[in-house]
Amino acid sequence: MNLSIVIPLLNEEESLLELYEWIKRVVQENNLSYEIIFIDDGSSDNSWDVIRSLQHKDTHVKGIRFQRNFGKSQALHAGFKLAQGEVVITMDADLQDNPDEIPELYKMITEDNNDLVSGWKKKRYDSKIRKNIPSKFFNWAARKTSGLHLHDFNCGLKAYNRDVVKNINVHGEMHRYIPVLAKNAGFTKITEKVVQHQARKYGVTKFGMNRFINGFLDLITIWFVSKFAKRPMHLFGLWGTLMFFVGFLSAFYIGAIKLLHLYYFHIPTRLVTDNPWFYIALTTMVIGTALFLAGFLGEIIIRTNQDIERYRIAEEI
């Protein structure tokens, strides 16, 4: 099969039939064997009924239904698991992504040997305050932390080599950073294509302002995993050692000053334990030790897993 088109959706009954007809016309004009996978992420309207009716009349259509809303990442993960095409293309169901982009995206994977092609909605028809400005900020932050020079990480219109979608795990709300997940998995041929963005024709957007808070937290997670997933001691060990020595030197200084006043100048002073800075120094030492041990245990776990993986590969050979 040439092409799998994965479409997550939530309450998009009005646009599904039009989207299906549009995709069908484009892929048939280009003589591509295909499947269309709709993932209903817990819709409360008649979206699933529309998908079922499309399935009954066209064997190219497949459907997955979630009993409740799990989020776009889980929907994409389910679609990726089911996809059989040589190239996998994702798009949103609200008709804001243009199916006419499919043939060129397909060629950029098959002929140009790219692993992933991310759409870039250079001209957008969204609200500037709710979407455009926050998206520019997150895309800038994602570029800085990931090293990938993409303009639009969160564009729903993307094309993947089949190996990419079978080797990444999209969970939480990581769908925004799939290119980064692909890079971390070893897929380096990642590029972008300017795509046509269209104004929403039916319904309203399903994303609120909370997605930007979640996106920022996910970006921190991605940055941490990219930098330190394979060497946690470099982070926890460094900060743990630094905090321990700062606390130790502070406690040593407090004790030395106490002895100096008491035995050399014969000046009575408060007990060391009456000094609040003593407890700050002690707490710093405890936190530093805990961080160092976290890094040490992380290194042991990673090395153990690597040894198990090497043994498994050796057994297969």
Image: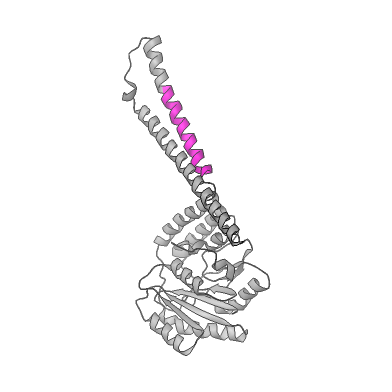
Residue at point 50% right, 40% down?
Answer: 237
Helix, strand or loop: magenta stretch = helix
Please tell me in which quadrant of the rendered image residue 313 appears. bottom right
Residue 161 shows in the view: no
* Magenta stretch: includes residue 245: yes
Residue 298 shows in the view: yes
Of 89 and 119, nearer the camera is: 89
Please, which residue is most extreme toward the bottom here? 57
Q: Position of residue 182 (x, y in %)?
A: 56, 62
Please, which residue is most extreme toward the right here? 111
* Magenta stretch: includes residue 88: no
Label tally:
0
Left/right placement of residue 206 relative to residue 91 reads: left
Left/right placement of residue 187 relative to residue 61 reads: right
Residue at point 42% right, 62% down?
Answer: 211
Residue at point 55% right, 79% down?
Answer: 99
Please, which residue is most extreme toward the front here? 315
- Look at the image and give the residue range highlighted in magenta: 231-253
* Residue 302 higher or lower than 270, as above or below: below
Q: Position of residue 140 (x, y in %)?
A: 54, 56
* Residue 27 higher or lower than 220, as above or below: below
Assign the C terminus to one quadrant of the image.
Answer: bottom right
Assign the N terminus to one quadrant of the image.
Answer: bottom right
Q: Position of residue 118 (x, y in %)?
A: 58, 67
Left/right placement of residue 177 relative to residue 68 reads: right
Residue at point 48% right, 61% down?
Answer: 174
* Residue 163 higher or lower than 213, as above or below: below
Please tell me in which quadrant of the rendered image residue 160 appears. bottom right
Q: Position of residue 172 (x, y in %)?
A: 43, 61
Please tell me in which quadrant of the rendered image residue 151 appears. bottom right
Left/right placement of residue 45 relative to residue 190 reads: left
